[in-house]
Amino acid sequence: MKIFQTTILIRSMRFSLIILALVTADDTQAKEGMWIPTLLNAVEGDMQAMGMHLSAEDIYSINDGSLKDAVVHFNGGCTAEMISAEGLLLTNHHCGFGQIAFHSTVENDYLKDGFWAMTRAEELVNSDLFARFIHRIEDVTENIATAEDPEQMKKDLVEAATAGNGLEGKVVAFDFGNSHYLITTITYNDVRLVGAPPSAVGKFGGDTDNWVWPRHTGDFSMFRIYANADNQPADYSADNVPFRPRHHFPVNVGGTKEGDFTMVFGFPGRTEQYLTSDAVARVIDELNPARIDMREASLEVINAARTESAALRIAYADKQSSIANAWKKWIGQNKGLIELDAIGQKRALEMQFMARASAAENVGWMRLISSMQAENEALFPFQMARSMFIEWVYYGPDILSYAQSFAPLIQNWESLEEKGELDGAISDLKGKTSNHFRQYEARVDEGVMAALLDPYREHLDVQFVPESMQNATNAEDWASSIFEKSVFADSEKIKAMLDKPNRKAFSKLAKDPAFQLVQAMRNVYFNRVAGEYRAHASALDSLTGEYTSALRALFPEKAFFPDANSTMRLTYGKVEGSSPYDGMEYRPFTTAKGILQKFIPGDADFDLPLDLVEALRAGEWGEYADDSGNLPVCFTGSNHTTGGNSGSPAIDGDGYLVGINFDRSWESTMSDILFDESRCRNIMVDIRYVLWITDVYAGAGHLVDEMTCVRTVEP
Ligand code: ASP
């Protein structure tokens, strides 16, 4: 079916006039896939048939400014986009959450009240926050495949591409090593917080609504990148000036509507589309249940503590969010994998694969599935041990990683001294210590430690559990014996030690129980797990690489895209709802009406500030209203996304920004392992809601003035 659509941009009070051509769009179904931006020629026609008016070159160009120059890898784990010529950057509230929480205090509670810099001088400086741009993506598969020493070749390629030009580079394996790309980047470190709505907007619905549609969350925050006078990266300095990007996205004040083309451009983290049926079964039966139990245990402690006082609510906001996000996703993932019979679907593909491999008389291919299954089995105990290690050291009690950061002083004082690095190490630890205790309460941390012990021992093979943890009889007593004696739980003591650094005193910390515990966990991990894990994972990668090549050869009618690997990808689809269960339908848009419908005074997830209730009730949307006079809040699309796509620009067919990707629906959470075209939907916050909150509710219209605003409307 052909849909004819005329798009005209009109001048409104603030917005400029542009006229666009008549376009046609086919009613093509959206497709699974996260495309490498240099290979878009293959899908350009399809995207244009769906309503895109740009060329592949407009999206990714080697020489000229293109859309890719406005897409940012935000602190390595999220995506962001440039929205002004003066370095203004838009991402999710949950991507800037760590910074918003860090700057919050009981007196200046930016989490609760929001934060808006009314002048550039008020923007808040962040340490350890970076914004990275892609300079170039180059296929070097041939170079690596033909090199005598592939590792040396990688080094040479990076060296040649980055010498003396301020770029960084990396050769990244795609598709389990079937291809390699040289990716050069440029990284800016002075990234300041400009604006964030109250959590009642940015995190509205909390854990209850996370991963759920219909959604009413204004999941956005704004930062500004600063550079030196030459527009080059520079550490923070008051002399730095706003960065001038090669491209920034014009913002489409007219938003988008059902059926329109959309694309999401960003840095999806990880998908596992090529797991075989047995591996999927282990995720469902063992891995996810273990991780869910661990997180449930720590969340119980943290959630309870956060209701005790404003100080604890703020201190544990960031940790709570990072634990809860994947916890809830894994629950949904298991549910979806079971509902879709992922194991059965994978088995059916494997049967077909075997049949075609045998018809092709390819013995190597015929053996592949069983080799992968054997390798999966060998890998799994180490994979589980690794996951549990990560749960403890990255998501568990903070005292562990904090104690570990003292290891150089405790174990290598002399060599630091010899190298003249001692003072630097101590001053780094002073900084770390003040940040650490700013968001810390030993009593809560002890509770987390106690809570994790039993689920850990229940799910993990005893051979990977350090002896002291095996022997503990009662989890509370065990944790309290550690916290009672550990200096790392006591900010005064540790600060005093850092103020008068003394080799002997630090070497005594080798006996500190928290330090000993983290050492014991690391010893088990590095001596018994990491090596085996790496060896099996890499053997499995090679087999999976053969498998994906064989799939492409044996199923020429299907497209097999390379798994996400935190590199830049583009995915496209349409603004559309879904019907994940019989007899029900998700509409693609939510509006401000729904915020008031969900409002529950005093509720942790659904409370609203009074001035927002009043503004929502007044309903003065001005130029941000949709055709029916409502304010759109969120919308769904059939774009294939994953974690890491958080904050990605949602772009219309003309290259204008219409929203920010931030989530997937509950019925899509299994999409990293099994994508389903009919039910997988990504969730985006509508740009009109972002603009209304910024301009009208927060009174930060100066930020909207800084953007390039356009409007597309039906004639
Ligand atoms: N909400 C998600 C995240 O935070 C984004 C996604 O996975 O779709 O990772």
Image (cartoon, rainbow, N blue to C red):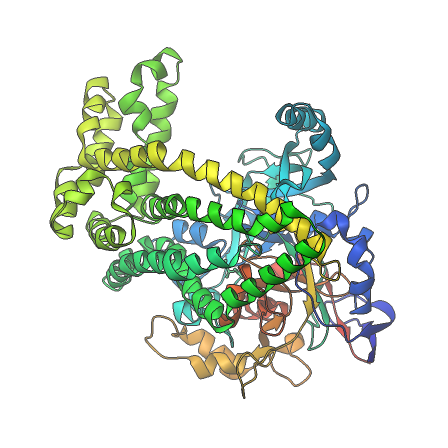
Outermost residue, right side:
21
Q: Is residue 247 visible?
A: no
Residue that appears at 31% across and 53% down:
315
Look at the image and tell me in which quarter the C terminus lies.
Answer: bottom right
Q: In this view, does 307 lie above or below 549?
A: below
On screen, residue 144 versus residue 226, left or right, reads right
Q: Is residue 94 above or below residue 74?
A: below
Residue 352, percent from left and from top? 63, 62
Outermost residue, top side:
418
Q: How many labels does the image show?
A: 0
Front in this rendered view, residue 286 or 292? 286
Q: Can residue 671 be seen in this view?
A: yes
Front in this rendered view, residue 388 or 396? 388
Residue 476, percent from left and from top? 14, 52
Look at the image and tell me in which quarter the N terminus lies.
Answer: bottom right
Residue 221, percent from left and from top? 53, 58
Q: Is residue 486 above or below residue 302?
A: above
Front in this rendered view, residue 181 or 675? 675
Q: In this view, does 322 lie above or below 50?
A: above
Front in this rendered view, residue 544 or 416? 544
Residue that appears at 19% across and 18% down:
504
Residue that appears at 55% across and 68% down:
693
Q: Which of the 4 image quadrants contains residue 288?
A: bottom left
Residue 175, percent from left and from top? 63, 46
Q: Which of the 4 image quadrants contains residue 411?
A: top left
On screen, residue 74 versus residue 431, left or right, reads right
Q: Which of the 4 image quadrants contains residue 414?
A: top left
